[in-house]
Image (cartoon, helix red, strand yellow):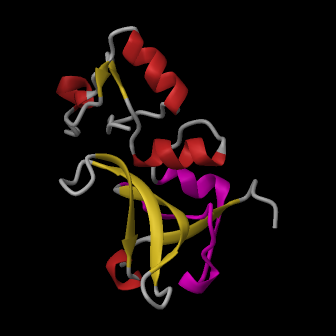
Amino acid sequence: MPYRWGGDDSPESYRLRADWGALAGSICTCRNPAYDYCLERRSAGVDCSGLVSRAWGINKRGTAGLLDVAAELRDFAELRQGDAVTWPGHHARLVVGTAGLFGDSIAVVESSTRLECEGACKRSYHPSELNGYRMIRYRGILD
């Protein structure tokens, strides 16, 4: 799904909005209030925190707002499918499992404007690549 700053479309709402003529994503991610933060109202897609919010079944929250509905984990070994890693104010990723030859990397789904992704995609990261990120689990997920 294309990246849309502030977006939280589901696949169904994305298709519906596209059928109504919405633009596929809005890669403009400036944070200038003079330009309404570059939010393109006629676009459809999902941003990083919108993707995590959708997966958790909650109303859209920003990267820092996800902390309000989640418990923080102490160690990467505690991460499991459905958890998230968030760098408040910057980015969030949904954990989908482990990766790497020895299971030493974290497989995530994220929505990004990075050239390697440009929308929602699956990637993997070694824990050392996630410095500054906080590991969280949605409180609504049953153990």
Front one among 89 and 75: 75
Q: Residue furthest front?
A: 101
Residue at x 81%, y 67% (from the top left corner) = 143
Point out the stretch of residues depicted in magenta.
64-89
Image quadrant occupied by the N terminus: top left
Residue 18 appears in the rendering: yes
Q: Is residue 142 left or right of residue 21?
A: right
Q: Is residue 83 magenta?
A: yes
Front one among 122 and 89: 122
Residue 39 position, x and y percent, is: 29, 27
Q: Residue furthest right?
A: 143
Residue at x 41%, y 37% (from the top left corner) = 46
Q: Residue furthest top?
A: 20
Residue 73 position, x and y percent, is: 62, 76
| Residue 47 placement: quadrant | top left
Residue 66 position, x and y percent, is: 55, 53
Q: Is residue 69 magenta?
A: yes
Q: Is residue 137 above or below residue 113?
A: below
| Residue 129 placement: quadrant | bottom left
Q: Is residue 31 left or right of residue 64?
A: left
Residue 43 position, x and y percent, is: 32, 22
Residue at x 55%, y 64% (from the top left corner) = 96
Q: Is residue 17 above or below residue 77?
A: above
Front one among 12 and 74: 12
Q: Is residue 111 above or below residue 21?
A: below
* Tally of numbered tags: 0
Residue 62 appears in the rendering: no
